[in-house]
Image (cartoon, grey):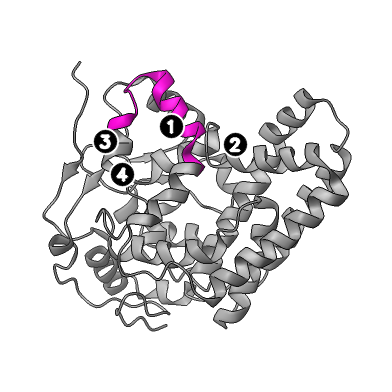
Amino acid sequence: MPKPNSFRWSMESEPHKPRTKEIIHKHPEIRTLIGRNPWTFGVILLCVGFQITLSWFLRDASWWVIFLVAYLGGAFASHTLYVCIHEAAHNLIFKKSFFNKIGAMTANLPLVFPSAISFQKYHLKHHSYQGVEELDADMPYRWEAKLINNSGFGKALWLLLYPIFQMIRPGRIKEVTLMDKWTVVNILVQTVFMGAFIYFFGWKATVYLTASFFFSVGLHPLGARWIQEHFLTHGDQETKSYYGMMNSVNLNVGYHNEHHDFPSVPWNKLPKIKKFAGSYYNSLGHHTSYTILLFKFLFDRNLSVYSRMARDNRGSKVKSPTVVRSENVEGIELKA
């Protein structure tokens, strides 16, 4: 089977805004779900405490124990913290942006690398310009897709190194200031924390945190989330949701169509969107197992890093109807 050598291209605008207007017209009760969930900060403190406590007990453990615990436990806590940073990026924890940034940087602490503030800037672009290479940091580089051999080993290596690819993609993003005062604060806070952590906990504990982070977004069933969200596993459908048991651990992160349609609804209320507007979501392709999806990605030669829908900036700016939400994202007025 020949190896794919390009993304699939669309001249249509991103699919979510028109559907949002249609759903909100037929199901105005969804407006009641818009809001914030300050209890998410409690989840942040719980997961940060969990990781620091485990790090202390693992500071003198055998290497195989460190990596096993990171894979079976730490990865889940790290992924949940990543989701909390995502919630803060949409201002879904507190009303004021300042406190959401504090929450995001708190969640960032056990994730080793400073990324909370940068994620917010690039992620909001992803919502507005889905699939536009120069504006969507979720899109792989073309050279990235070309580099990865469409074999199980090549794709496994790509997932293993996925955090590194994520870190370098923002370099191509336009219309975003790379450094600002909050980014500097994030870097300083993370540097001080990790310096103190290495001094008091040692290198084995530091390796545990690092391994937890890499597993949480890489070569792990949780890493299949990146395949689930926007890889073309169901024809030309760009966004897929996941309805499986991991949602109970990772704050309903699988409800991705629902989130893109209504990004001002906090994680605890995303299942209600599907309940209210099931006729729209039940007919869409979705996934129920991250483990099955992980192996499908690794061994199905029809799936590769090229299995993404791309569009140019002109297609992304096709006018879509104004929709009802609770924040202003890229110039779209959203009201509760």
The numbered mark at residue 48 is none
Seen in the image, is 315 located left or right of residue 76? left
Q: Secondary structure at mark 1?
A: helix
Query: Label 3 vs label 4: CA separation?
Result: 9 Å
The residues tagged by marks 1 and 3 sit, at their Cα atoms, a distance apart of: 12 Å
What residue sits right under mark 4 in the picture? Answer: 141
Q: Residues within 10 Å of mark 1 (few under 14, many from 20)?
A: many
Is residue 233 in view from this perspective? Answer: no
Residue at the spot of label 3: 306
Residue at the far top: name it.
Answer: 1
Kindly report the distance in space between the C-alpha atoms of the residues bearing marks 1 and 2. 12 Å
> Viewed as shown, does residue 192 lie left or right of 232?
right
Looking at the image, tell me whether mark 3 or mark 2 is earlier in sequence order. 2
User: Pointer 3: residues within 10 angstroms few (<14), some, or many (20+)?
Assistant: many
Kind of residue at badge 4: Tyr
Q: Position of residue 151 (x, y in %)?
A: 35, 19
- How far apart marks 4 and 1 lie (CA) works out to 12 Å
- Give, as a single range, the part of the protein colored magenta: 146-163
Residue 155 sits in quarter: top left
Question: Tag 3 or tag 1, which sits nearer the N-term?
Answer: 1
Q: Which quadrant, please, contains the N terminus?
A: top left
For image coordinates 45% across by 71% down, the residue present is: 264
| Disc number lying in front (2 or 4) | 4
